[in-house]
Amino acid sequence: SKIQVAIVVGSNHSGSINRQYAQALARLLPVHFNVSYPQIDDLPMYSLDLEGERPASVNRFSREIAAADAVLIVTPEHNRSLPAVLKNAIDWGSKPMDKNVWRDKPVAITGTSPGAIGSALAQQHLRQIMSILGSVVLGGEAYIQFKPELITAEGDIGAASRDFLQAYMDRFVWLTEKLKG
Ligand code: FNR
């Protein structure tokens, strides 16, 4: 049966390298995996003041994550952590506590940066947050230093990273199908 994957890109930059990377990764998923890219850059900054009547963008985001069988988060690194725009989306999804959309969700984490450690610290921090929220975070790691050849002109993952990332996506597929039952 069809599997729905929400790919959350942790960037609000129109030329985001992480968005390009996410789209190339999506091509490594099997054909029965449908992907969507929930928008996060229109979510207001989290405030308890807005909990009385949640903005439509927040309800849309929460619904999309809740409906997904699994989530793939593709994040840049900002000052050795995850970008605020991504943390804000995660915070919205985590509240109210009895409707935390991240709980029991299979989550895989990756990301790219031109820096030598390829967003490793952002990913490490994100892994900690998602674990606290009750997600089933895929083990292993995929820290990808961005170079132009990471993505081919056709939009596929380049040869040098392809086997490694295919194996990582295959493990994400395995976890998702295992938890879906
Ligand atoms: C960065 N960048 C960055 N890169 C990195 O490897 N480690 C870091 O800690 C940071 N810190 C950082 C802070 C801020 C405020 C900005 C704007 C940028 C560079 C970052 O990797 C680069 O901008 C990427 O292009 C971000 O990915 P997207 O947004 O293009 O997907």
Image (cartoon, rainbow, N blue to C red):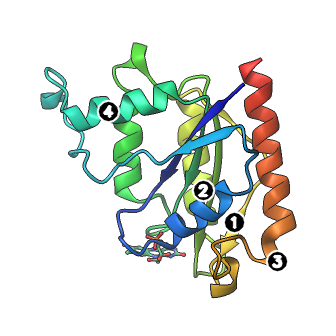
Residue carrying label 4: 60
Separation of residues labelled 2 and 3 (CA atoms): 23 Å
Residue carrying label 1: 143
SS at mark 3 in the image: helix
Residue 69 percent across, percent down from the top left: 61, 28
Separation of residues labelled 2 and 4 (CA atoms): 25 Å
Can residue 140 be seen?
A: no
Label 1 with label 2: CB-CB less than 8 Å: yes
Q: Is tag 1's residue or tag 3's residue first in the polypeptide sequence?
A: 1
Q: Nearer the viewer, mark 4 or mark 1?
A: 4
Residue 78 percent across, percent down from the top left: 44, 68
SS at mark 1 in the image: strand
Location of residue 153 by image quarter: bottom right
Q: Nearer the viewer, mark 1 or mark 3?
A: 3
Residue 123: assigned label? 2
Residue 159: assigned label? 3
Separation of residues labelled 1 and 3 (CA atoms): 16 Å
Residue 85: assigned label? none
What residue is at 50 percent from the left and 25 percent from the top?
67
